[in-house]
Amino acid sequence: MTRPLCLFHLSDVHFGLEDARALEWVKAEIAARRPDAVAITGDITMRARPHEFAAAERWIHSLDVPVTVEPGNHDLPGYHLPSRYLNPLGRFRAFREVVERRIELARPGISGIALVPLNSNVPAQPRFNWSKGWISGRALADCLAQIDALPAGMRALVTVHHPLREAGTHGTALTRGGAAALAALAQRKVVGVLSGHVHDAFDLMEPTPHGPVRMIGAGTLSRRLRTTPASFNELAWDGAQLTVTVRNLAGLDSAAMQIGEVPADAEPPGAARGDASSA
């Protein structure tokens, strides 16, 4: 029997406030289990400072597996407004160039799966809390074009930082443009959408006018815990079904680790509202 493809899904490591014990544990798990790839869905740093990106680079290079990374709201500089407005993802892109390898997973007997990025960050928003997501028309178009260009038979896992859920009212929506993005993804060969941001794991089916889309969230590997211990997701793809197991330091089963709803206010304890890099 062909062994399923294995992907480790990490998020919200927050170098600068990382959990060193959790990172050593994940590194040991990667060395022992040798996943086909690792996906990190944003908030790699705490404040997008050079030394935080440098620490993240050293850790990722020590893993010796293909890694793909997405930016989170913490990976945009919040303390230097000229950089935030003029080149908000400059430091992240320089970091991405030295750590990332494009990932298309395939094995004889298993239909392939590709990780396709979707950026959910903008430098400024017309609402008080800039930590929340915003899917621009350009970002969605770029993601859809990459999905449409995949080889025949190749499926997609979309990687994004913010959950594509417009929780709450229009003014406080968790991710502006998330509903439109989900509706577009539902019409394509998308297995699921991997995200982070809320610091708790989840595995939910989100309805759209074109059918449901699976939303899969990873917890945090930082000291900024919300309601569950430090964790990551182990995903197995057999060519037809994606299985998600939440691995965590407390040894809890997946059901105990996964929240049943994406919260409208996703900030972990201690996050300052209105801080451009909070949550």
Image (spheres, grey):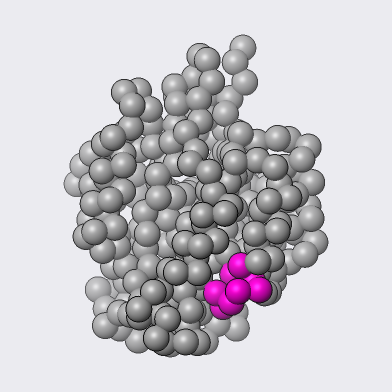
Q: Which residues are magenta?
A: 45-53
Within the image, what quadrant is residue 186 found in? top left
For the residue pair 133 and 167, the one nearer the viewer reads as 133
Residue 183: in magenta span:
no
Q: In x, y percent, where is residue 5?
A: 57, 28
| Residue 88 drawn above or below residue 148 | below
Q: In x, y percent, where is residue 163?
A: 41, 59
| Residue 121 drawn above or below residue 239 | below
Quadrant into which the N terminus falls: top right
Q: Residue at 39%, 37% (x, y): give it.
A: 156
**Residue found at the far left of this picture:** 209
Q: Is residue 272 left or right of residue 143?
A: right
Q: Is residue 124 visible?
A: yes
Q: Is residue 59 left or right of residue 135?
A: right
Q: In x, y percent, where is residue 152?
A: 31, 23
Within the image, what quadrant is residue 16 found in? bottom right
Q: Residue at 50%, 14% (x, y): give it.
A: 109
Q: Residue at 50%, 87% (x, y): give it.
A: 79
For the residue pair 128 and 101, the one nearer the viewer reads as 101
Q: Residue at 46%, 74% (x, y): give it.
A: 76
